[in-house]
Amino acid sequence: MTVVIAVPGSDKQAHELAARLGATLLVPEVRQFPDGELYVRIDGDVKGSDVVIVGSLHHPGAGSESRLLHVGPGNRFLLIAFLAGTARDLGARSVGLVAPYLSYLRQD
């Protein structure tokens, strides 16, 4: 079984991928504490599943519908790492990433 997890701000891409794969789509609970630390919770069964995390590392613009408007590329990377670790802790067979944009790859 394949499970697609949507990083906040990448919900549309995650939904489209899950539909094409015939996979279950999960939207994690993600909160940012006043000090900037992140809380991540995956509500759904991923045990024994192949998990695909869909999330871009770009900083969402002011018009974004992202639930985490103040999370820059560095913290978005941490968010994805926390989601991957949580999926593994919950028994996922494998964890992969689909990232339409990767920060810090420019050479200028």
Image (cartoon, rainbow, N blue to C red):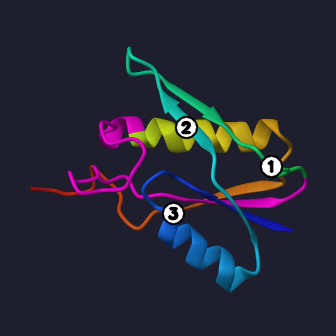
In the rendered structure, which segment of residues is drawn in magenta? 48-75
Reading the chain from its start, which is encountered first: label 3 or label 1? 3
Of all residues, the one furthest to the right in this rendering is 48
Q: Quadrant of residue 105?
A: bottom left
Q: Earlier in the sequence, mark 1 or mark 2?
A: 2
The residue beneath circle 1 is 44
* CA gap, disc 2 and disc 3: 13 Å
For the C terminus, the quadrant is bottom left
Q: In the orientation shown, which residue stands out farthest toward the top?
A: 35
Amino acid, disc 2 = Val
Q: Could you classify mark 1 by the number of other residues whose Cα lies within 10 Å: few (under 14), some (14-19), or many (20 or more)?
A: some
**Amino acid marked by disc 1:** Gly
- Residue positioned 83% across, 40% down in the render: 90
Q: Is residue 65 left or right of residue 85?
A: left
Please name whichever residue, 18 or 86, is drawn nearer the observer in this view of the structure: 18
Task: Using the image as rendered, state which of residue 68 and residue 52 is in the foreground.
Answer: 68
Is 105 inside the magenta-drawn segment?
Answer: no
Please indicate whether residue 87 sits to the left or right of residue 59 in the image: right
Instruction: Compare marks 2 and 3 and give the one earlier in the sequence.
Output: 3
- Marks 1/2: CA–CA distance: 14 Å
Mark 2 lies on residue: 30
Q: Residue at horizontal 39%, vertical 51%?
A: 66
Q: Where is residue 8 shown, x and y percent of the image?
A: 48, 51
Residues at badges 1 and 2 in contact (C-beta under 8 Å)? no
Q: Could you tell me residue 24's position as x and y percent?
A: 76, 67
Amino acid of disc 3 = Asp
Above or below for 31 versus 2: above
- CB contact under 8 Å: marks 2 and 3: no
Q: Residues within 10 Å of mark 2 (few under 14, many from 20)?
A: some
User: Looking at this rendering, what residue extends furthest in the bottom direction?
Assistant: 20
Task: Give the label on residue 35, or none.
Answer: none
Q: Mark 3 = which residue?
A: 11
